[in-house]
Amino acid sequence: MVPLQGIVVPRFYGVWTLEQTPCPPDSEHEYALPGTGADCILTILEHVGEPWMDDRSATRQNMDEADRERIREAHRALHRVGVIHHHASHKMSHTMLDSQGRIRLIDFERSKRCKPVVDGEPVSWAVLEEMGMLDRFLWGEW
């Protein structure tokens, strides 16, 4: 998603890790991160504003045609680089609005790789399914 960083998705600045350290002898926990069995890993990303709309207020009536098209185009951009977001149908809290009014998509833990969409070539069922769910949310019955 490198070509989309700073445009459709947040810029990726790096990863910070914290190794587990033993807790003091009087602690009830053996390690500073009890029960994880792993180090703490943080992904550092660009701040991309606030949710465009929270999930409870996300209705077609709150969106004009231009808003719908911008959201749809952000998902199309992901598909062109071979990513399916998997939050397209109802999670408007994963659609952010940055300080310049651009739509940004976040939260990719459910995303999947797909064949990049190229104009004029067949599209995978997964892309068609995601765009169908998004279109039903934005324009149709849901």
Image (tube, rainbow, N blue to C red):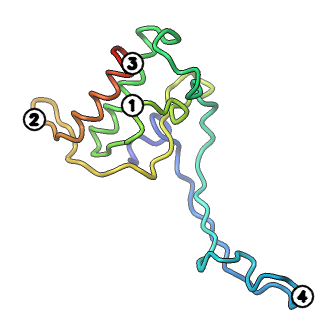
Name the residue type under label 3. Answer: Leu
Q: Dot 4 lies on which element?
A: loop
Q: CA distance from mark 4 to mark 3?
A: 56 Å
The residue under label 4 is 26
Comes first in the chain, label 4 or label 2: 4
Q: CA distance from mark 3 to mark 1?
A: 9 Å
Report the front residue among 104 and 56. 56
Tags 4 and 3 in contact by the CB under 8 Å rule? no
Q: Quadrant of the C terminus?
A: top left
Q: CA distance from mark 2 to mark 3?
A: 25 Å
Q: Dot 1 lies on which element?
A: loop
The residue under label 2 is 121
Which numbered marker is on residue 89?
1
Q: Nearer the viewer, mark 4 or mark 2?
A: 4
Name the residue type under label 4. Answer: Asp
Percent of width and height locating residue 126? 23, 41
Percent of width and height locating residue 103? 49, 27
Packing grade of label 4 (10 A; few <14, some 14-19, many >=20) is few
Q: Quadrant of residue 4?
A: top left
